[in-house]
Image (spheres, rainbow, N blue to C red):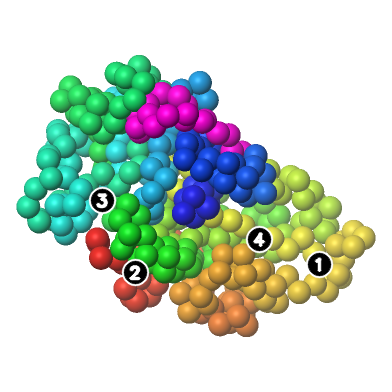
Amino acid sequence: MLEYLLWNLKRHGVTDIVLSVGHLSDVIVDHFGDGKHFGLSVRYVQEDSPAGTGGALALCAPLLQERFLFLNGDTMFDFNVLDLALAAARSDALGCLALRKVDDVSRYGEVVLDGMTVRRFAEKQAAQPGLISGGVALLKREIVNRIPAPACSLEKDVFTPLAEAGLLAGKAYGGFFIDIGLPETLDDAQISVPAWQRKPALLLDRDGVLNINHGYVCSPDRFEWTRGAVAAVKAANDAGLLVLVLTNQAGISRGYYTELQFQAFMAWINDQLRAEGAHLDGWYHCPHHPTEGLGDLKTDCDCRKPKPGMVRQAIADWQLDPQRCLLLGDKRSDLQAGEACGVSGALFDPGHDDLLEAVHHFVLPRLLATPKHSNSYS
Ligand SMILES: [Mg+2]
């Protein structure tokens, strides 16, 4: 469960992890170590006697940044975490909870939301639709000053008084949700969580789809989004798709820029997206050219589109189902790379098309047509 939770955080760019551990902590520490093997930095805070969620958070205080994401280890709630970060940044509240819409609040207790403000936590009640806490919150570090005792409940002893004072925000999301707090939901999670992880994906060519192709673009001053690009990536993120970029970068072979410069530039692009609540889950590039270039990079590789190497690699890395992927490219050769792997696609014309419209009218209807994986609590 923790591995799935951390995988989901990592793809959003959240890589600095503090695990609050108690029972069987050695098993968890042995498994994750310092996190490097998982592409993360993982640190641990040991709870020697049960301190409740509030007490556990208090123990973590010295390791927390000014604002941090708080997650329960026994719930999986998949939504656009960066959208919650945006909502929290725009709010004066001390915390912003991710709330899940459910058909039946009776097992959980309802969270009463008024606009963006959490008014109260209702006691367990009749079976009816409403919002529940999804076990994820974006919090300001000063919230630890509101923890009243070394052992207490975050929801009951911290969030409830904050809500009464109007200092707690919330935002509702859909998306996969499961809580493994009951034997039957734990059984359900053994199947539904791995199935959820095989997410539908939007594969994007970069130059001519995400940005205007000015030719060998590798610096912010020559970078220009295509129409609707940032909103399109966010719409795909919000809908629960993976967004992966697949790009031929013969500029590396030709010596126009280096591998490191390319990677730094992609990270810059991702930072621009993240500031708008959007992100790329990953990117793949071909640095080769068959006839031009330097040393080993001059080669007839398997990754330069129309060859399918990058698509194949993306499918392997993310366990993609080709039938639940779509590829947008501005050239036939982009689409050929997808077709070789059973991924269908469409041509995008950066001179005429709007990428957000393409996502709304072409991508989402096709990829979400098969019902999204749901569970008995959705
Ligand atoms: Mg292109």
For residue 175, side relative to residue 39 (left or right): left
Callout 1: SS: loop
3D distance between C-alphas at marks 4 and 1: 15 Å
Residue ID at (57%, 46%): 27
User: Crowdedness of circle 3 by 10 Å Cα count: few (<14), some, many (20+)?
Assistant: many
Q: Circles 4 and 3: CB distance less than 8 Å? A: no
Query: Residue 372, which numbered label?
Result: 2
User: Most extreme residue toward the right, as rendered?
Assistant: 295
3D distance between C-alphas at marks 3 and 2: 16 Å
3D distance between C-alphas at marks 4 and 3: 33 Å
Which mark lies nearer to you, 4 or 3? 3
Query: Residue 284, which numbered label?
Result: 4
Q: Compare marks 3 and 1 and give the one earlier in the sequence.
A: 3
Screen quadrant of the C terminus: bottom left
User: Crowdedness of circle 1 by 10 Å Cα count: few (<14), some, many (20+)?
Assistant: many
For residue 305, side relative to residue 278 (left or right): right
3D distance between C-alphas at marks 2 and 4: 26 Å
Hey, what amino acid is under mark 2?
Lys
Residue ID at (38%, 75%): 366
Which mark lies nearer to you, 2 or 4? 2
Query: Residue 100, which numbered label?
Result: 3
Q: Which residues are magenta?
A: 41-60
Residue 151, position as x, y percentages in the image: 34, 25
Hey, what amino acid is under mark 3?
Arg
Residue 262 visible (yes or no): yes
Which mark lies nearer to you, 1 or 2? 2
Q: Compare marks 3 and 2 and give the one earlier in the sequence.
A: 3
Q: Compare marks 4 and 1 and give the one earlier in the sequence.
A: 4
Q: Which residue is mark 1?
A: 289
Q: Is residue 179 magenta?
A: no
